[in-house]
Image: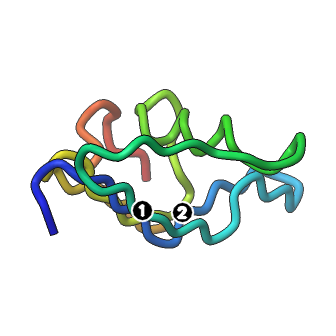
Amino acid sequence: MHDREIVVENLVKAYPGKVTAVDGVNFRVDEGKIFGFLGPNGAGKSTTIKILTTLALPTWATSRWAAMMWSTRPARCGGWPEWPCRM
């Protein structure tokens, strides 16, 4: 693993009413690579980018971006410094 790679494991974003926008996404982007998301409308591409750029909170995820770890676990505080803990 390099210090400047993006690693996403089991990214999930669920909304009330049993709507799941992102369901268990896993990927890795190595340093210096260009990466793009392709998929049909409603596949969760924008939601994934919003989560990675901290514009949205994931329901569940473990990720590393530029050697900074963040993760969330249901009903616990994660390593997400931009938002206060909500229990």
Q: Is residue 7 left or right of residue 39?
A: left
Task: Name the spot of residue 21 as percent of width and height, x first.
Answer: 76, 52
Nearer the observer, 28 or 71: 28
Task: Name the spot of residue 60 as percent of width and height, x first.
Answer: 51, 64
Q: Secondary structure at mark 1?
A: strand
Q: Is residue 37 left or right of residue 55?
A: right
Dividing the picture into quadrants, the one containing residue 18 is bottom right
Give the colouring mode of the picture. Answer: rainbow
Dividing the picture into quadrants, the one containing residue 22 is bottom right
Q: Secondary structure at mark 2?
A: strand
Nearer the observer, 74 or 53: 53
What is the tally of numbered marks visible in this picture?
2
Residue 75 seen in this snapshot: no
Q: Residue at x 26, y 44 (%)?
A: 32
Mark 1 nearby-residue class (10 Å; few <14, some 14–19, many ≥20): many
Q: Residue at x 62, y 71 (%)?
A: 24
Q: Is residue 63 above or below residue 47?
A: below
Task: Name the spot of residue 81 as percent of width and height, x first.
Answer: 23, 38
Query: Where is mark 1, residue-wise?
Result: 8
Residue type at tag 2: Leu
Residue 57 seen in this snapshot: yes
Name the mark nearer the viewer: 1 or 2. Answer: 1
Residue type at tag 1: Val
Dividing the picture into quadrants, the one containing residue 3 is bottom left
- Marks 1 & 2, CB-CB < 8 Å contact: yes
Q: Residue at x 80, y 49 (%)?
A: 39
Q: Quadrant of the N terminus?
A: bottom left
Mark 2 nearby-residue class (10 Å; few <14, some 14–19, many ≥20): many
Q: Residue at x 65, y 40 (%)?
A: 47
Query: Where is mark 2, residue-wise?
Result: 11
CA–CA distance between discs 1 and 2? 7 Å
